[in-house]
Amino acid sequence: MATKPADTNATDDAAQVTDQTSHVQQESDTQKYVTLDDPIKRAGQTISRVLVRKPQSGELRGVSLMDLANLDVNALITVIPRVTTPMIHKEEVARMDVADLMQVGAQVASFLATKEAKAAYQSA
């Protein structure tokens, strides 16, 4: 069976991203979908939904964790391309709608908290 490439066409169920085995990637504690208010247009494609995954330590190289936690724009421009599927390029991040940048950035920042801190926050 042939594998289906990642499809980011807006007409294909909100640009769900498929992995190499043609299964829609599922949300988990380490990856979450974010729906963009202002979809990204790229070479005849429209990206309206991206999967944001928890960064690994090496993907945070060159970025201050405090800057990332504070949603510093430069830190987000550096990290978002490293943790999104389909990848949002640096130039696209720099042109993102501010509400979308906040939404994706907040998801990235939420991955920095420990499970215990998240549980305490949710129960408060």
Image (cartoon, rainbow, N blue to C red):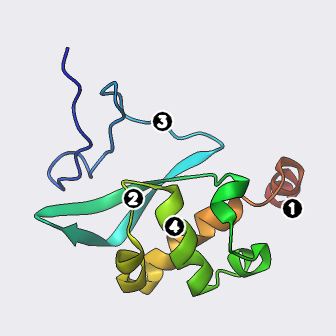
At which x and y percent is residue 107?
A: 60, 63
Between disc 2 and disc 3, whose residue precedes? 3
Taking the view exactly as shown, the residue that stands out farthest to the top is: 1
* Cα–Cα gap, marks 3 and 1: 28 Å
Between disc 2 and disc 1, whose residue precedes? 2
Q: Which residue is mark 3?
A: 26
Secondary structure of the residue carrying numbered label 2: loop
Amino acid of disc 3? Gln
Q: Residue at x 53, y 57 (%)?
A: 83
Amino acid of disc 4? Ile
Q: Residue at x 65, y 80 (%)?
A: 71
> Where on the picture, by quarter, is residue 61?
bottom right
Q: Which residue is mark 1?
A: 124
Does the CB distance between marks 4 and 3 fall below 8 Å?
Answer: no
In this view, the mark in front (4 or 1): 4
**Placement of 105 over or under 45, stated as above or below:** below
Amino acid of disc 2? Met
**Placement of 92 over or under 28, stated as above or below:** below
Q: Quadrant of the C terminus?
A: bottom right
Q: Quadrant of the N terminus?
A: top left
Q: Which residue is mark 2?
A: 87
In this view, the mark in front (4 or 3): 4
Q: Which residue is mark 4?
A: 80
* Cα–Cα gap, marks 4 and 3: 19 Å
